[in-house]
Image (tube, rainbow, N blue to C red):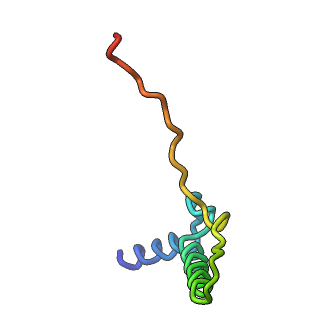
Amino acid sequence: MRGRILKYLGYYNTDRMHSSLGYLTPSEFERRWRADNERRETIVQRGSTALPTAGRFPVRRKRPNRPTVDNAHR
């Protein structure tokens, strides 16, 4: 049983793409995230104020606001 669980975890983290991660595997997403953070730390250490942020990783968007329903008039 342990072998099957480990095999599935390996598949889940290294082979299975996730739509919420921009169709990347969790391990690839984390590798890119770490590389991006290291690059940002280097930029900050050099004293630059321009940190590129747009378009690097998928962002979960909030649902659009819905109008409130007033049930008091029923």
Name which residue lies at 63% across and 68% down. 53
The quadrant of the picture occupied by the N terminus is bottom left
Q: Residue at x 58, y 83 (%)?
A: 44
Quarter of the image for residue 68 reads top left
Q: Position of residue 58 (x, y in %)?
A: 60, 61
- Locate residue 54 relative to residue 26 in the image: left or right: right
Q: Nearer the viewer, residue 31 or 44?
A: 44
Direction from residue 23 to residue 60 in the image, left or right: left
For residue 44, above or below residue 71: below
Depth check, front residue: 56 or 15: 56
Q: Nearer the viewer, residue 65 or 26?
A: 65
- Please tell me whether residue 70 is drawn above or below residue 47 in the rendered image: above
Quadrant where the C terminus lies? top left
Name the residue at 61% across, 86% down. Answer: 47
- Eyeballing the image, is 61 above or below 70? below
User: Residue 56 at what x, y percent from top left?
Assistant: 65, 68
